[in-house]
Image (cartoon, rainbow, N blue to C red):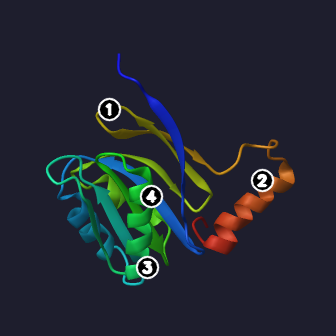
Amino acid sequence: MADLKLSCESVEIPEGCNVIVGQSHFIKTVEDIFEALVTSSPSLLFGVAFCEASIERLVRRDGNDNELIDCAVKNALKIAAGHSFVVVIKNGYPINILGRIKSVQEVCGVFAATANPLQVIVAESEQGRGIIGVIDGGSPVGVEDAAGETWRKNLLRDVIGYKR
């Protein structure tokens, strides 16, 4: 049996941004995620980084904002798991683009899409590193009451405009 080491990597999320962490299977991932995002909104800024798992094993990158590309690369290097990808977005929300990312043919799955503090749980063996899961934000401290329900509905309907 191979030795396995676990670690927890904190993801850097710039102020006003969201991050998406997922797994894919092919070098073309970075280009296809770029295409999915660049056509989603003219105001969306983003950076994409993809950890190639074979051949040269480089972090491939793309995007339309150099600071967000650099942030995605920095996070991808910290996670350093084969075939993982990191997307950092600004001027948009994951709810608006997750469907596009999930429909990219190379994408196997999404572990997290958040602006919350995020930690990625990584397993490492002699072969390499892989993502086991994520810790997204904090643990619950109670159950929603009537005032909390009113606040949530107001947020969705009046503040964000997602529901009418």
- Local secondary structure at mark 3: helix
Q: Nearer the viewer, mark 1 or mark 4?
A: 1
Q: Earlier in the sequence, mark 2 or mark 4?
A: 4
Q: Earlier in the sequence, mark 1 or mark 3?
A: 3
Other residues around mark 3 within 10 Å, as few (<14) / some (14–19) / many (≥20)? some
Label 1, on which residue?
Answer: 126
Judge from the rendering whether residue 35 lies leftward or rightward of residue 71; answer left or right. Answer: left
Q: Nearer the viewer, mark 1 or mark 3?
A: 1
* Quadrant of the frame with the C terminus: bottom right
| Residue 39 visible to an observer of this rendering | no
Label 2, on which residue?
Answer: 149
Nearer-the-camera pick, 124 or 90: 124
Label 3, on which residue?
Answer: 67
Q: What whole-number distance in Å separates the C-alpha atoms at marks 1 and 4? A: 27 Å
Identify the residue at image location x=82%, y=42%: 142
- Local secondary structure at mark 1: loop
Q: Amino acid at mark 3?
A: Glu
x, y percentage for residue 118? 57, 53
- Local secondary structure at mark 4: strand
Q: What whole-number distance in Å separates the C-alpha atoms at marks 3 and 4? A: 16 Å
Q: What whole-number distance in Å separates the C-alpha atoms at marks 2 and 4? A: 27 Å
Q: Nearer the viewer, mark 3 or mark 2?
A: 3
Label 4, on which residue?
Answer: 20
